Amino acid sequence: MPITDADLTPRFPRDPETAFFLAPQAAFGTPTYTGLQALHFTDFDPQKPRDPIQEREYGGADVDGAIDQGEVVFGDITVTPPLKTNLCLNEIGFWLAYLLGAPTSTDLTGGRYQHVFTSGKSQLPIGTLLLQDPEGARVIDSCVVGSLALAIAQGGGRQVCDFTTVARDMVQVPTATITAGVAAATAPPTRLFVPQKAWTVAMDGTNVGRLLSATLNYSADIGTDRYVDGGDAIGASYVGDPTASLQVSLRHVNEAQRALFDNENTAKALTLTGTAAGNHSIAISLPQAKIPPVYSAKDDKLRSLSLTATAERNNGSAMTITLINSLASY
């Protein structure tokens, strides 16, 4: 008897995503349980390490030079929850608003909206993350998003975003504490995924070949003002010098595309675009990218290219991401 898809489903779930909740937070140290937005993740396991600092002091005159062990105190509490989520053109905007700041949004009519996120904000917003457990709920307080990694392969599955975050604290609260907020939460938006082979790469607005693979890495260079006042906390979240890098492998279709990479020391705009159903899209652009190409030759013709484009804040905006999707605002 042939094996059917239904036979495989129980053992090999195709979409193991789980929902959690995100809400904008008005002040550090004061988590919110209202205005929650349900989102999906594929891998999320926040940890709360405490590093003990051994406080020592020199002893009294009777034991000259001896070291006595004082009381054990704790240093800063750091919650570092790495989070992975499938690249959905509607959901990623919520994360980009924390990584890059609020976007400039435009109604394109016909149920399509454009959101332009640009790096370089001096300060980033904070949020509360809620993750429900069987014994209650984990509340992650004063969370900021510090970096994004995204890998794209023409032969791969759904693209996965890997966000790193920094938070003030994580506490366990009874389910009853968040029941009302969860009941009133906004449901996850419509999922918009980019097909594997629906990605293109352009330089200064001109297509430069068939994309084979790409890897994006962006760091906001988060700095925090910490203070101790009866406990550890983050006083503020500041952006230092953001950096972006885009590794691209592509194959040229003609010599004109290869020639676009002459004068490699000149800063150029490199843009990676993915298109989903309904003419929705995401365009990731490094406006002032330095592009040192590395070619491989075949039949004496330069056709295959690998490059790493980098941009920093002092060259202008390190990165711009433009979303066209079905959500009016973030």
Image (tube, grey):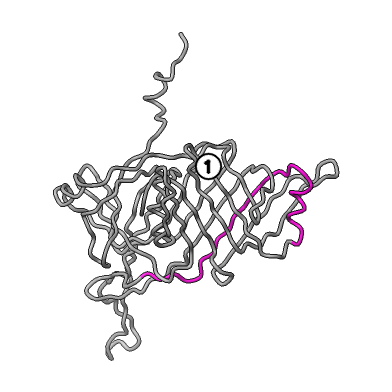
Which quarter of the rendered picture does the C terminus lie within? bottom left
Residue 193 is situated, as x and y percent measured from the top left of the image, at 46, 39
Q: Amino acid at mark 1?
A: Thr
Does the magenta portion include 254?
Answer: yes
Residue 217 is situated, as x and y percent measured from the top left of the image, at 53, 56
Q: Disc 1 on helix, strand or loop?
A: strand
Q: Residues within 10 Å of mark 1 (few under 14, many from 20)?
A: many
Residue 125 is situated, as x and y percent measured from the top left of the image, at 35, 64
215 vs 263, left or right, is: left
Picture residue at 48% right of the left edge, 37% below the top? 277
Which residue is identified by label 1? Answer: 275
31 vs 247, left or right, is: left
Quarter occupied by residue 223: bottom left
Figure check: 284 above or below 213? below
Q: Which residue occupies the extreme front position in the image?
A: 109
Picture residue at 81% right of the left edge, 42% below the top? 298
Give the number of marks.
Answer: 1
Figure check: 221 above or below 246? below
Q: Which residue occupies the extreme bottom position in the image?
A: 61
Magenta part of the chain: 237-263
282 vs 214, left or right, is: left
Residue 248 is situated, as x and y percent measured from the top left of the image, at 63, 50
Does the magenta portion include 137?
Answer: no
Picture residue at 34% right of the left edge, 53% below the top? 46
